[in-house]
Amino acid sequence: MIRFLTGGAVVSAFAVIGDLFKPKSFAGLFGAAPSVALATLALTIASKGPQYVSTEARSMLLGAIALGVYSLVVMRLLFRAGVRTTIVTLSGVIVWFAAAFGLWFALLRHAT
Amino acid sequence: MMISASTGGLHQTKWYEYAARFLFGGAMTVAAYLIAKHFGPVVGGLFLAFPAIFPATATLINNHEKERKQNQGLDPGCRGRRAAGADAAGTVMGSIGLAVFAIIVWIFIPRAAGWLILPAALAAWMLTAAAVWFVWKRRPWRS
């Protein structure tokens, strides 16, 4: 419950900050804010210790690269193809999974 | 274009849109914890950069832009999609900052206190993301 409330509050706070800014490309920076990471890591340090958090952060680096690939694909589709925003952003999540787990398989599958 | 901040966008957002983002954010934080618990921190860490609320935010931007044009008596055309596309362009740049955030936490969290490293990593995210945005906006390689 604490994780849910903390995560909801942090994610909402970054989303609201993003809503304040113009142009949209600058506001979009907040779409990649470390909101879930902050809420999760702050609570995990206390329960699992810094080495566990360090391991999570190493994998998060691959997740961040996957987020960059995902948003690049979404951006290009929104600018060039006549597909609805909801469909593009939701189906594009497949790209995130492919990139994140592709990198994980290539670099971290034997890591502990 | 210069950066400006106004509360106009906040008035356009409806209460259930705020509630949806809160629920998505909370659910994703719990999901990231459960995935790490089941599959370990190596797999769980990937989900700390999952685009949890991006689809909801992009759809909101799309709808708000369309509404704004319709209220002005104009044909929205593809303006909603283009606004969401501009937001996605920002997220591409923000993800570079997010990678810097992850690198700082990965390297420094075993060596220093969490209350020091997490705010420092957050500041590094913001500075990196903003710096990339400014460079992209000026595009010095185009002149």
Image (cartoon, coloured by chain):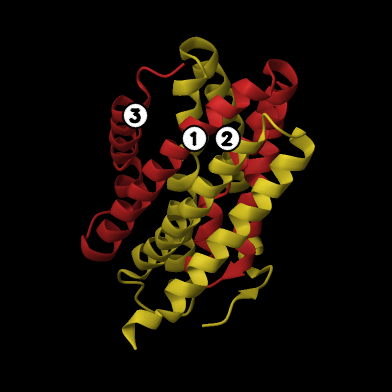
User: In the rendered view, does A101 fall on the left or right side of B65?
Assistant: left
Query: Can you give x and y, in whole percent of width and height, for residue B125 in the image?
Result: 59, 53
Q: The yellow chain is which one?
A: B
Residue A24: in sight, yes or no?
Answer: no
Q: Which residue is drawn at 52% across and 58% down?
A: A29
The Cα atoms of the two marked residues, 2 and 1, are separated by 9 Å
Q: Quadrant of the C terminus of chain B?
A: bottom left
Query: Can you give x and y, in whole percent of width and height, for residue B75 in the image?
Result: 34, 76
Crowd band around label 2 with a 10 angstrom C-alpha radius: few (<14), some (14–19), many (20+): many
Crowd band around label 3 with a 10 angstrom C-alpha radius: few (<14), some (14–19), many (20+): few
The amino acid type of the residue labelled 1 equals: Met
Q: Do the residues labelled 2 and 1 touch (CB within 8 Å)?
A: yes
Query: Can you give x and y, in whole percent of width and height, for residue B26 in the image?
Result: 61, 31
Judging depth in this view, the residue of B23 and B108 nearest the camera is B108
Asked if residue A1 is positioned above or below residue B68 in the image, the reply reads above
Q: Mark 1 points at which residue?
A: A60
Query: Considering the numbered disc 3 on the image, is that residue within a helix, a strand or a loop?
Result: helix
User: In the rendered view, does A10 fall on the left or right side of A24?
Assistant: right
User: In the rendered view, does A82 fall on the left or right side of A44?
Assistant: left
Q: Mark 2 points at which residue?
A: B106
Residue B127 falls in image quadrant: bottom right
Chain letter for mark 2: B
Q: Mark 3 points at which residue?
A: A107
Q: Do labels 3 and 2 share a chain?
A: no
Asked if residue B102 is positioned above or below residue A76 in the image, the reply reads above
Q: Drawn colour of chain A?
A: red
The amino acid type of the residue labelled 3 equals: Leu
Q: Please tell me how many numbered marks the rendered image carries.
A: 3
The Cα atoms of the two marked residues, 3 and 2, are separated by 15 Å
